[in-house]
Amino acid sequence: MISYDLTRARRAVQFLVDSSYFHQHVRKLRSTVTKPRAMPFKDESEVLNELLVVGRQSAQAMENLIEVAQIKRDDRNEYQRQYMAAKRQRDRKIIEFEERVLGKKLGPEAKIQVLQRQYDTWNRERDALLKSMGNVSWADRNERLKDFWARKEREFDALIEEAKVSGPVKRKRIVQVAAKPSTAFGEKLTKAIQYPPPKR
């Protein structure tokens, strides 16, 4: 049976997930694990020494923990790519709506101002939503934020359709909808998420 500190092992995995030096740390772990007394990680990365404690008892167990970190990193990177693609789509809708309301094309500086004004409003709503979540897992947090942004897109879809019918108007509008409270389904998701995530 492997003897190690579970809390420190979890922190070590999360440190790898968050680190910009993931590959360097992994190389160091693999090159040091065969040296019985070496504990090379210091300061912020000190928690990675716990993975060496695991690895010196079972090399495969350490590799499994590294794999968990890699999976979480891949998931996070894919989320970031999807988020940026969705943001570009939201930006286009904001500009399209504004141009329909005004009845003219916007220049580069005007587009920046319109986007900034809308995101100032949305970011306040997003921050309120995050605060209302309390302590939830990274996966559940991102799922709720995904739902939040999807609602914003649907709102603009409706506004664009309305503007197509009504044409230009004198008064500009900023869309602001109160964040919905967390649902029972969301709470079930939170409880269902376990650490570490299952291997693929």
Image (tube, rainbow, N blue to C red):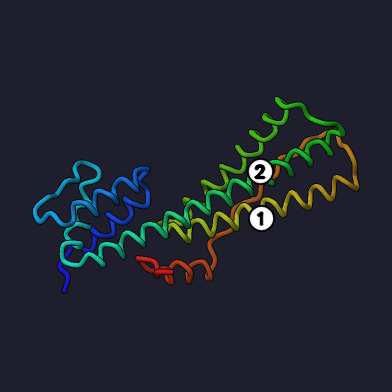
The quadrant of the picture occupied by the N terminus is bottom left
Q: CA distance from mark 2 to mark 1?
A: 15 Å
Rendered image quadrant of residue 181: bottom right
Whether the residues at callouts 2 and 1 have beta carbons within 8 Å, the answer is no
The spot of residue 109 in percent (x, y) is 70, 25
Q: Residue at x 61, y 43 (%)?
A: 122
Q: What is the residue that sits farthest to the left in this orientation? A: 37
Rendered image quadrant of residue 121: top right
The quadrant of the picture occupied by the C terminus is bottom left
- Closest to the observer: 125 or 23? 23
Mark 1 residue element: helix
Query: Mark number for residue 151?
Result: 1
Above-or-below relation of 34 to 2:
above
Above-or-below relation of 131 to 123:
below
Three-letter amino acid code at the position of disc 1:
Arg
Labels 2, 1: front one = 2
The spot of residue 97 in percent (x, y) is 79, 41
Q: Residue at x 81, y 34 (%)?
A: 171
Circle 2 residues within 10 Å: few <14, some 14–19, many ≥20: few
Q: Residue at x 72, y 27 (%)?
A: 108
The spot of residue 91 in percent (x, y) is 69, 41
Q: Is residue 161 left or right of residue 91?
A: right
Rendered image quadrant of residue 6: bottom left
Q: Is residue 35 left or right of residue 80?
A: left
Mark 2 residue element: helix
Q: How many marks?
A: 2
Three-letter amino acid code at the position of disc 2:
Arg
Q: Residue at x 40, y 69 (%)?
A: 199
Query: Mark number for residue 88?
Result: 2
Circle 1 residues within 10 Å: few <14, some 14–19, many ≥20: some
The mark that comes first in sequence, 2 or 1, is 2
